[in-house]
């Protein structure tokens, strides 16, 4: 069985999956790719590309097993956990439902918002500096029309006021949700350490730099961010960084809900 | 009285997912029909159960569960009965991927058509403009208020409808290709992905007759008919009360030829 995990800078969904891999104890080859150069869309040996091409997450990590591209960070993390140490998901069905609901809340509402703000702050400069020819090659390699549209918006700097405000609110909501969840003094979001901690951390780690006010009155969240950051699996993931500040590295993410 | 109560509308889309999953598992439940077109989901009795005012919701003892796909996963894990998730971890990943793709990318496009052509006009005809405005003002979630307003007053933009139409066509092609690879959606086992997918796709040959039929999408048709024949599906769709659910009977036809796009819109809910 040939297995390779292709990941971007350890931030966002790439960080979540690298951390879950660390916790799983599995020995899987990891290959860094340059997301903003479009490398995710030109991976070698992919014979089943549908999940890479049409995934909701946007530029997340890709686990390629025997040619099948696997995407969506929460589900890759579940896969790694279930094939490996099996410690990152509650056994009880109700607690498991709570974890899935939490992750869905983060991926559906917080992730598009964080990616939008992050892309404005960082990816826009990179993509707008790109020459026409390599840019054309990147676009040509992206199969999904709506993902292509999100890339173009980042390059041209199309970040309207309304979604910017909405995104800042959604990130603040996620922080409030974390703060509330930790109110009983627990260390981890679900009680025990789960996929939810890594998924949430991945999307929030870069946000204090962009939205300090959202974190100002959230001491429990700050302590939790530190706890996750110092976890050996996260440290090992961060050690793979190619840049000094991986938390500032972004790429086009999930779309903001079309229904408003 | 059963310990499980499911609050649901028609066997269709989000409501139909946990209904069919419970029936496949053989879990007895009290079926509590919420008449969505009569805004029963925003009444105080229901808001006491799910303050978000959306359906479906399930109670089990003193626990309240929401979010249709997550409810199905809970039902599968909590109760005895046939396992609706396969033993192989990569199959489970594929099933989860397809459910997310359907829930968040494909289904909202279908429902934009359903709300524009069925939910909105029917609710408006039943209540009249003034009463509807008041009903909409009482909806707890802002995004559901937007959806109702757009549906009732025909405010979906052309660009929005065109994008939903594009996604429906792409999604049908993807489903057809995927179902050509294996007997069931995303694995060789009947699973939650099939329960989810059937709720999205059962009326395709009626609502998208130019895109899905026995000539163009034989794998989708084989798959829909196989699910339609299952006893749980038969029992589930009997709980429907509107013309929406009765569309499922089209799957009794052995051969469904291509028809013009316009016939899909006339046929009720596109
Ligand atoms: N993601 C949720 C969506 C629930 C939802 O929005 N349901 C719609 C019907 S499919 C609803 O309750 N609409 C009632 C309303 O808008 O008033 C799920 O899958 O359960």
Image (cartoon, coloured by chain):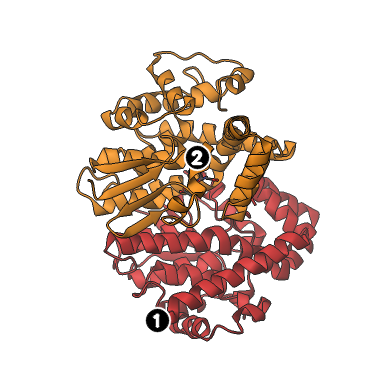
The residue singled out by tag 1 in the image is A184
Left or right, B168 with respect to A73, comes to: right
Image colour for chain A is red
Percent position of residue B195, x then y: 37, 38
Label 1 vs label 2: CA separation?
38 Å
Q: Is residue B224 above or below residue A249?
A: above
Q: Mark 1 near mark 2, Cβ–Cβ under 8 Å? A: no
**Direction left: furthest residue:** B80
Identified at 33% across, 62% down, the residue is A96
Left or right, B117 with respect to A197, comes to: right
Asked whether mark 1 lies closer than 8 Å to ligand 1, one says no
Rendered-image quadrant of the C terminus of chain B: top right
Q: Specify the label residue B36 is tagged with.
A: 2
Q: Specify the label residue A107 is tagged with.
A: none
Percent position of residue B165, x then y: 63, 33
- Quick one: SS at disc 2? helix
Chain where mark 1 sits: A
Identified at 54% across, 15% down, the residue is B258
Crowding around mark 2 (Cα neighbors within 10 Å: few <14, some 14 to 19, many 20+) is some
Tell which tag, 1 or 2, sits nearer the viewer: 2
Image colour for chain B is orange
Identified at 33% across, 40% down, the residue is B31
Quadrant for residue A191, please give it: bottom left
Left or right, B242 with respect to B225, comes to: right
Asked whether mark 2 lies closer than 8 Å to ligand 1, one says yes
Percent position of residue A134, x then y: 73, 55
Crowding around mark 1 (Cα neighbors within 10 Å: few <14, some 14 to 19, many 20+) is few
Quadrant for residue A110, please give it: bottom right
Tell me if I can see residue B163 in this picture. Answer: no
Marks 1 and 2: same chain? no
- Quick one: SS at disc 1? helix
Chain where mark 2 sits: B
């Amino acid at each position: 069985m040939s297995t390779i995990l292709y990941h971007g800078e350890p931030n966002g969904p790439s960080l979540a999956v690298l951390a879950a891999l660390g916790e799983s104890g599995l020995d899987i080859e990891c290959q860094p790719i340059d997301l903003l150069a479009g490398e995710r869309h030109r991976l070698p040996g992919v014979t089943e590309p549908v999940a890479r091409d049409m995934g909701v997450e946007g530029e997340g990590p890709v686990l390629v097993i025997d040619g099948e591209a696997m995407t969506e960070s929460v589900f890759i993390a579940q896969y790694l956990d279930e094939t490996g140490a099996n410690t990152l998901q509650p056994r009880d069905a109700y607690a498991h439902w709570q974890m899935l609901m939490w992750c869905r809340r983060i991926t559906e509402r917080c992730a598009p918002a964080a990616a939008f703000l992050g892309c404005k702050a960082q990816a826009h400069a990179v993509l707008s500096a790109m020459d026409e020819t390599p840019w054309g090659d990147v676009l040509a390699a992206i199969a999904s029309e709506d993902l292509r549209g999100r890339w173009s918006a980042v390059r041209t700097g199309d970040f309207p006021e309304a979604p910017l405000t909405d995104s800042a609110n959604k990130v603040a909501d996620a922080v409030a949700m974390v703060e509330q969840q930790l109110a009983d003094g627990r260390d981890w979001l679900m009680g025990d350490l789960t996929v939810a901690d890594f998924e949430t951390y991945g999307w929030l780690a870069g946000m204090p730099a962009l939205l300090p006010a959202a974190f100002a009155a959230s001491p429990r969240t700050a302590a939790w961010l530190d706890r996750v950051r110092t976890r050996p699996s996260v440290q090992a993931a961060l050690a793979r960084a190619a840049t000094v500040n991986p938390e500032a590295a972004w790429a086009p993410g999930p779309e903001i809900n079309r229904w408003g | 009285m059963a310990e499980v109560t499911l609050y649901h509308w028609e066997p269709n889309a989000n409501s139909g997912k946990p209904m069919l999953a419970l029936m496949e598992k053989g879990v007895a439940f009290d079926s509590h029909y919420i008449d969505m077109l009569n805004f029963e989901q925003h009444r105080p009795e229901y808001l006491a159960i799910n303050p978000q005012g959306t359906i479906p919701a399930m109670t089990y003892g003193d626990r309240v569960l929401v979010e249709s796909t997550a409810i199905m996963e809970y039902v599968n894990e909590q109760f005895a009965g046939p396992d609706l998730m396969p033993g192989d971890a990569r199959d489970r990943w594929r099933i989860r991927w397809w459910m997310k793709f359907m829930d968040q990318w494909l289904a909202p496009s279908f429902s934009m058509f359903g709300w524009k052509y069925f939910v909105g006009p029917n609710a408006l005809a039943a209540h009249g403009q003034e009463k509807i405005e008041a009903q909409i003002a009482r909806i707890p979630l802002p995004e559901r208020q937007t959806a109702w307003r757009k549906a009732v007053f025909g405010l979906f933009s052309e660009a929005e409808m065109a994008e939903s139409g594009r996604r429906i066509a792409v999604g049908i092609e993807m489903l057809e290709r995927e179902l050509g690879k294996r007997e069931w959606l995303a694995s060789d086992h009947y699973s939650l992905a099939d329960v989810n997918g059937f709720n999205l796709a059962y009326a395709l040959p009626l609502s998208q007759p130019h895109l899905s039929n026995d000539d163009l999408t034989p794998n989708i048709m084989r798959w829909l008919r196989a699910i339609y024949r299952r006893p749980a599906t038969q029992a589930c769709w009997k709980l429907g009360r509107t013309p929406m659910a009765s569309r499922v009977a089209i799957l009794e036809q052995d051969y469904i030829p291509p028809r013009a796009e316009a016939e899909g819109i006339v046929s009720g809910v596109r």
